[in-house]
Amino acid sequence: MPRALITGITGQDGSYLAELLLDKGYEVWGVVRRASTESYERIEHLRDRLHFAQADLLDQPSLTAALQQAEPDEVYNLAAQSFVPTSWTQPVLTAEFTAVGVTRLLEAIRQVNPAIRFYQASSSEMFGRVLETPQSEDTPFYPRSPYGVAKVYGHYITVNYRESYDLFACSGILFNHESPRRGLEFVTRKVTNGVARIKMGLDDHLTLGNLDARRDWGFAGDYVDAMWRMLQQDEPEDYVVATGETHTVERLVQLAFDHAGLDRDAHVRTDPSLIRPAEVDLLVGDPAKAKEKLGWEPSVDFEGLVRMMVDADLERLSGAGGATRG
Ligand code: NAP
Ligand code: GDD
C-alpha cells in the first residue's frame, strides 16, 4: 500500500486530495497544527480513514518527526498562508509559512528519506503583472503581493533541491481552483455564499472590491488529480494547471445572481477599501503540457462551477433553516 503525507489536509485542496488518494488505495497521513479548537470540517467524512501527525511548517523538528512517523512515499506540501490580502498585513508570517516552510520540509525529507517524491503547491499568483498571455511554464514571474513573492521562493527552492540533491520534487503552478469547500473569504465563495444568504433573506447585499480582475477558475477536485499525476511520472518536472479560459469577477457575480434568480443590481455594492495595494489584473493559463504529458483535462467548466457552488451554499443554508425569497 503506498503511503502519502499531506500538509494542509484540513484545507480545501487537502480534503479533495485525501479523498482521491484513499480511493486509489493509499494510506493517507495528514499534518495538522495544534489548535485550542480542531478545524477538521472539510475532512470530517474521512476522519476514520486518515492518520494524523501533529506538526507545523514553522517548526523543523516537528516536520522531521512527522516524516519518521508516517514513512511516506509521497509528500504533498499544500500548507500555506494562502489568502492574498493577509499577506500585506502579515508579510513576515506569510514568508515563514509559505516560503521558508518549504525549505524546512525539503530539509526534513533530505534527512529522513531522500527517495520521497515531493509536490509543491506553486501558484499562478507568481505571474502577477503578467509578462505574456497565456501564461505557461516558461513565462517569467512578476509577483504582485507578499504571498506571490513567497510562492516564488517556494517554487525556486523546490527546483533547486531537485537540481542540487536529485530529489524527485515537482512544482504545480496551479491557477485559481474553487469548490463548495473554498474558504469564505475568497471571491468565488464570498459571492456564492453571499447570493445564497440574500436568497434566504439572511442578508440584503454583498460588498466586493475590484470587479474587473480576470481569473482562470477551475474546480479543485480536478486540480488535485493533476498533483497526483505529476508524482507518477518518470521524471520530476513543473506543470501549469489551468482551464485556459479567463472571466471577470463581474461575470462570476452575474452568473451567480442569475442562477439564484436574483437581480444583481439590487444587491451588489463595491467598497474601495477592498481594492488591493497591487492587483493581478489578468490570469489565464496554458495547460498544454499538463494535457500532453499528464493526460490531464478539467471536467467542470466555469458556468458549471458557479452553479455547483451556489447550489451547495443554498442547500447548506436551507438545512440551517433559512427561507427563500424571489
Ligand atoms: P487553504 O484552504 O487555505 O488551506 C491551507 C492549509 O494550510 C490549511 O490546512 C491550514 O491549516 C494549513 N496551514 C497553514 N499554515 C500552516 C502551518 N504553519 N503549518 C501547517 N499547516 C498550515 O488553501 P487551499 O486553497 O487548499 O490551497 C492549498 C495550497 O495550494 C496552498 O499552498 C495555496 O497557497 C496553494 N494554491 C492554491 C490555489 C487555489 O486557487 N486554491 C491556487 C494555487 C496555489 P489550518 O486548518 O490549521 O489553518
Ligand atoms: N477575496 C476577494 N474579496 N477578492 C475580491 C473581492 C472580494 O471582496 N472583490 C474583488 N475581488 C478580486 C480580487 O481583487 C482578485 O483580483 C480576485 O477577486 C480573486 O481574489 P481571490 O478569490 O481572493 O483569489 P486570488 O486570485 O487573490 O488568490 C487565489 O488564487 C491564487 C492562484 O492564482 C488564492 O487561492 C491563492 O492562494 C492562489 O495562489
Image (cartoon, helix red, strand yellow):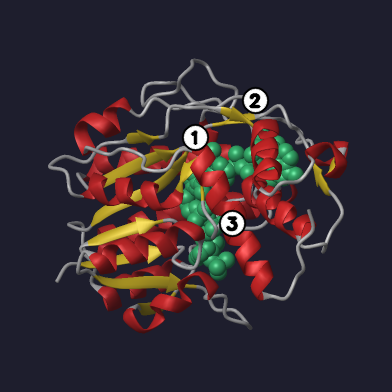
Q: Quadrant of residue 14?
A: bottom left
Circle 1: element type: helix
Q: Residues within 10 Å of mark 2 (few under 14, many from 20)?
A: some
Is the residue at mark 1 in contact range of ligand 2, meaning its CB lies under 8 Å from it? yes
Q: Report whether 183 appears left or right of 160.
A: right
Q: Residues within 10 Å of mark 1 (few under 14, many from 20)?
A: many
What is the x, y in percent for residue 33? 52, 73
What is the x, y in percent for residue 201? 82, 62
Identify the residue at image location x=26%, y=42%. Answer: 162
Query: Please, which residue is most extreme toward the top here?
Result: 132
Give the mark, 3 or 1, whose residue is nearer the N terminus.
1
Q: Quadrant of the N terminus?
A: bottom left
Please say if 121 is above or below 77. above
Q: Which residue is mark 1?
A: 124
The reply to whether discs 3 and 2 touch (Cβ–Cβ < 8 Å) is no
| Residue 79 makes an appearance in the image | no
